[in-house]
Image (cartoon, rainbow, N blue to C red):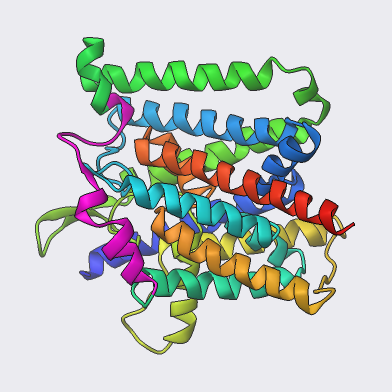
Amino acid sequence: MPAELQVFAKTVVWWGFGLGLIFGFFANKTNFCTMGAVSDVVNMGDWGRMRAWLLTIAVAILGTNILAYTGKINLANTIYTGQNLPWLAHIVGGLVFGIGMTLASGCGNKTLVRVGGGNLKAVVVFIYMAYSANVTLRGIFAVPRVEWLQAPGVTLNLPTHQTLPHLLHGSLGMDLASAELVIALVLSGLLMAFVLLSKSFWENKDNFIAGIVLGGVVVAGWYITGKLGWMENPETLTEMAVGTNSKLAESMSFIAPAGYTLELWSLWTDTGTVVTWGIATVFGVGVGSFLYAIATKAFRWEHFVSAQDMFRHIIGGVLMGFGGVTAMGCTVGQGITGFSTLSVGAIITFLAIVAGSSATMKYEYWRMMRES
């Protein structure tokens, strides 16, 4: 990378760390947990944390598409909005991730938050999740991912980008920019109405804070990488996002970046490995959670209670690494960041994650009742 772009890349990376820090701090403060949200609904019928997740999505959708409508960012420059839709990878990856996060007691984001709070179980989950993500990106797990789940025979080649505005603007009689704004307003409005009109939602103000702050962080991430960090490479004369692994605009996502983090540690003396936006956000979330835990005296060491408990969490971490990379994102990477682009693949993944997690919880309950 030319020297002048390296300066901008470092700026993007520091912004990533800062936004990750905010994300981790408030995720810990508000007990934001997507697995917990599913568990509350399935086991107790409590929609409080699920509504916090949906509010986060709504805020992200609204802010992201306002940026796109005003020309600040181009949502075509992301990994979520291409013309190829590997629907089977989104379904299987989402289901596997949902199972994994249930076994591991939390998704990728919650794992980082727990690491910052002193949870040694989460440290083990992170290591296995990151290693699994790496071997799914370029190792042995990449074989089933590429040859089976993302094979041409199970991939839809769409005539346009796989976002709702691209697919629907013709039938709506609108230009693309107007369709992006209208669909974003309608969808985010419906989600906000479902969330904010619930009296029970306001019983815990932290749910509202989580939705506004974390959704805002995702929007800010798009602006940093898609606007401030988007520039022309003077050597190739092509536009790209500096400081990101994909060279495309990115925001909050934690599975592949966890793999890149482990790779950076493994190849620290290799000058070809550098801290990127994704890696910086991983560190930021952990540090932000740690700062909150220290400030509130909530930091405490936690450990496995049995070998079975450890095995369960290891399997969960491996499944999250495979599922998150295969589905191109996790509960945050697809469930919020990808969803904010109105990507069909992100919506499929979101539903698959919830389904996988819900089914696992119901099975665990059935097994527990059978053994009792």
User: Which portion, as a residue range, is magenta?
Assistant: 141-165
Q: What residue appears at the point 32 percent right and 27 percent down from the top-left corner?
A: 164
Is 6 on the left or on the right of 255, as rendered? left
Q: Position of residue 85 (x, y in %)?
A: 28, 44
In front: 61, or 71? 61
| Image quarter (top left, top right, bottom left or bottom right) of the C terminus | bottom right
Is 288 on the left or on the right of 320, as rendered? right
In front: 144, or 241? 144
Look at the image and tell me whether residue 120 can be seen: no
Q: What residue appears at the point 58 percent right and 34 percent down from the top-left corner?
A: 56
In front: 64, or 44? 44
In front: 63, or 13? 63
Taking the magenta stretch, the answer to whether it contains residue 149 is yes
Q: Position of residue 159 (x, y in %)?
A: 14, 34
Q: Quadrant of residue 244?
A: bottom left
Q: What residue appears at the point 55 percent right and 37 percent down from the top-left corner?
A: 215
Q: Is residue 131 above or below residue 20?
A: below
Total numbered labels placed on residues in the image: 0
Taking the magenta stretch, the answer to whether it contains residue 191 is no
Q: Quadrant of residue 196?
A: top right
Q: Is residue 363 above or below residue 279?
A: above
| Image quarter (top left, top right, bottom left or bottom right) of the N terminus | bottom left
Q: Position of residue 343 (x, y in %)?
A: 36, 36
Q: What residue appears at the point 66 percent right and 30 percent down from the top-left corner?
A: 51
Residue sitting at the far bottom: 269
Residue sitting at the far front: 370
Q: Quadrant of residue 65?
A: top left
Is 343 on the left or on the right of 240, as rendered? right
